[in-house]
Structure formats: structure tokens, C-alpha cells
Image (tube, rainbow, N blue to C red):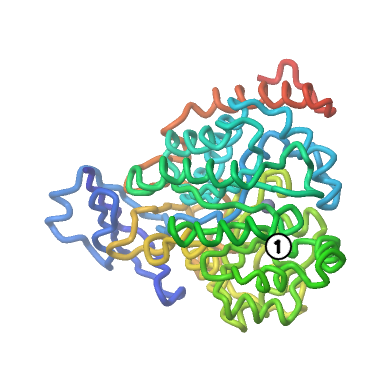
Amino acid sequence: MTNILIKDGTILPCNQDFKEIITPGYVYIRGEVIEAVAAGEPPERFLNESDEIISATGFVVIPGLINAHTHLFQTFIRGLADDKPLLQWLASATWPGALAMTEEDFYLSALIGYAENLKCGATSVLSQDYVQTSKRNMDRVADAAYEIGVRALLARGYADRDPYKPEFQETPEVVIRETERLVKHWNHREGGRIRVEFGPLIPWGCRPDTLQKINQLAQEWDTGIHIHVNETQPEVQMSLDEYGVRPVRWLYELGILNDRWQLVHCVWLDEEEMDIIAQTGGTIIHNPVSNMYLASGIPKVTEWRKRNIPTALATDGPGSNNSQDMMEVLKFTACLQKVGTLDATALLPEDVLEMAYHGGARAMRLPGKIGRLAPGAFADIVLLNLKRPHIAPVHSPASALVYNANGNDVDTVMVNGKIVVRNGKLLTVNEDKLIADCQRAAEKMADRAGIQSWRSKNWF
Ligand SMILES: [Zn+2]
């Protein structure tokens, strides 16, 4: 067990009051957990018992960010499907690229995705991986999380009916058997740093009876359920055409919505659907950059907040963003609502942090344990450099974080009490080798898929 003391920093604890600032202050970490957060000089015993003391002068000390929705295999297709709406984006590069990926590609694409998330300050990543072309793809995504040291919740994605692309469809029996295998293997190892849950992709690719079955198993196995809903207008129309009701209403009528559900996007909810989500207790996961990138629309985040619907923030997959920088997501979250409502006060920096941290913790199914700096919480901590020309001078740390900072300002990252990024450099993988391996493997994937890719013969 390692004890670490972070002292002389500006601390944003992000407990109840997001305006609270402790400066100067210290955080004492015993093993995997935060033991103390307080103002002023640390007591003598913390100084004596520390294996390492980090001076945080000039840094803001924040909880690790929580990226509540991504698809990490898409690191290999970023830039291949730009400038298309969702359904064309899927058909032109995302599906063909995914079909051409090997097990090793799933490992490498996840590893570089986690590397980017960590370096940009996200200590928790919720990735929905829905390409089960080999039985081991999900295992390799989990192996990469284990090795790099990130906290991960992996939604095992599936589709089990038309019109979702037949090559990706599985039988309900395989979905349940494989999810059970992964849950049993991962969810209780290393204190649950890596966990697996159900990931039905979209209502239009999922059979109702399977959804009811997995909802029952999620209670038994104590897991969550992660699904895209109401992302685009054509998808809402598909539900109206097939079932005569909108997608969230359809899930509600199946009798399955509850607080285990993570509802991704929710761009096109009507009033009744918002009321249903508020009553049944699901968490919405908002992806502002992806919603702009795919021209999906502007979600009514301010309406969700009026109904107290828990909301987490996320990048979405690297194929529709195209980065994994959660610092960038903070700014877009505020700005998209301002322009959507024509109200400059629609979301304040503190509102954005509340969603990113407390909504994110709820999406990860770890409320109170991550997304705050408090005794008893996991030591998932980021030190961010405020002494930069695009940030200083600082009058409000929350404003500086949301509107000025970006992922490159992250200096130190700790997950579960272990330092994984120091001085902006990853400690757990060889970054140069990883980038070179991924470039080579992604070019081969594009070749196999017959997708035209930019070539860089002597680039690395
Ligand atoms: Zn997605």
C-alpha cells in the first residue's frame, strides 16, 4: 500500500457545493482511498507517513473526469467517416472498418483510447463495445484497461435483430452467455476497477423479449444497462413506424425502465418521454460534440435539469467526435445549451461540473465513490496546470476549467491511488510505440476493409 500526500494546491472538492474552493489545501491518500481533504498545512503524521509528497503549487486539484460513453474501437476509424449523418456514418466506414478489425486491433484501439482519456484527465471510462466478430474482442478491451490502469465500465454491446447489420447480430443466448462469462470474470477482480454490464445498442436493433430478460438478469447480477435512444429524428420515426410509439415510451411499455438504465443521447425526447425518464430513474448521458458532429440536434439539457434527471457527460466514440478530450466536452456542454436556448445563463460552469462529476459517478454506478474529493472516495485525482497563457490569470477556477483548460493542461493523473500520468507523460505504456503500432494496424485495417485512407509511408 502506498500513501501519497498532495499539498499546497487549489482544491475543487466537488462535493455538494461546486463553488467550494480550498486554497491552499492538501489531499492525503492511503492506498486506494482518500483519507483527508483540508485547508492549510498537512499535519505532521501525514508528512511522516507519506511514501510520496507532491507539491501542487500552481495546480488545481480536481476529481478525475468521467467519460460516460464511448466506443473505443473507433479510434481506428477516426477521420474515415467525417461529414455524414448517423446512418450513413455507420454504413460508410464504421461497419466496414469494424468488420476488418482483428482481436489485436481491438486491444490496440482500446489502449490508445484509454491513453488519450487518461492524458486528458478522465480516470473513468464507460465504453460500449458492440463488435463481437470474435469471441475475445471484449476480453482484449478489458485487458487493455487492466494494463493501463484506468477505471472502466464496459457495456457489452449487442444487436439481435434486423434492420441492424446482419454480420453484427448475435442470438440472445450468445449475448447472455458471453455477458455472464465477462461479468463473472471481471466484476470482482481488483476491487471492481474493471466491470462489465449489458449494452443493447439501440431499440431498433434489439428484440423486446431479450431486453426484458437482460433487465431481469441485471437485477440478479447487479449490473447496469447501457443503450442509445432518440439520437436522431429518423430513429424516432423508425420506432413510430414499427410500434406506433416513440422509443423511450416503447421501453417504458416493456416494463423495464429503472435506475439501472443509462440512456445515451436523448436528443429528440418529447415532454412525455422526459417525464417517463424522470419517474423511472434512469441516467441520461449527454454527448454534445458528437451531437454537433453528426448533426443529430441540440438536446434539451435545461429541460432535463428542471425535472432533476441525472445527467452524465461524454465524448461518444472517437469516430464521431473525433477526440476523447473530456475537458473539451465541458466547454461544448455549456456552449451548446447557450446557443440552443439563446440564454447565456442556460448552464453555468458549476452546473457543467455537477453533471460531469455526480452524473458521471451515477452512470458508472459508483455514486459518492468517484467524482468528488472526500474521505472514503476512491483516489481518482487529477492535477491540472493553471500557469498557462490560455488560462492565467485565474479569477474563478471552475470557469477556468470549463472555458479555458484543455486536455493538454493535465499534468498528473491518479487512479485508485496509483499515479498513471506524471508531467503529462503516461507511465504505464510506451506511448511512442503505441502510436506507431496503432498507425500501422489501422492502415492495414483500412486496406482490408477497402476504405480509402490517408497514407504516410515514412511518417513514423
Ligand atoms: Zn455512441
Does 259 sit above or below residue 147? below
The spot of residue 25 in percent (x, y) is: 30, 63
Q: Residue at x 45, y 48 (%)?
A: 195
Q: Residue at x 52, y 50 (%)?
A: 125
Does 180 sit above or below residue 98? below
169 vs 230, nearest the viewer: 169
Q: Label 1 is placed on what type of residue? A: Val
Q: Residue at x 35, y 43 (%)?
A: 189
Q: Which residue is mark 1?
A: 229
330 vs 60, nearest the viewer: 330
The spot of residue 363 in percent (x, y) is: 52, 62
Crowd tier of the residue under label 1, counting other residues whose Cα lies within 10 Å: few below 14, some 14–19, many 20 or above: many
Name the quadrant of the C terminus: top right
412 vs 429, nearest the viewer: 429
Name the quadrant of the N terminus: top left
Q: Residue at x 37, y 61 (%)?
A: 369
Does 262 sit above or below residue 122? below
Residue 172 lies left or right of residue 356; in this view the side is: right
93 vs 170, nearest the viewer: 170
The spot of residue 142 in percent (x, y) is: 49, 38
**Is residue 403 at all visible to an observer of this figure?**
no
The spot of residue 281 in percent (x, y) is: 54, 74
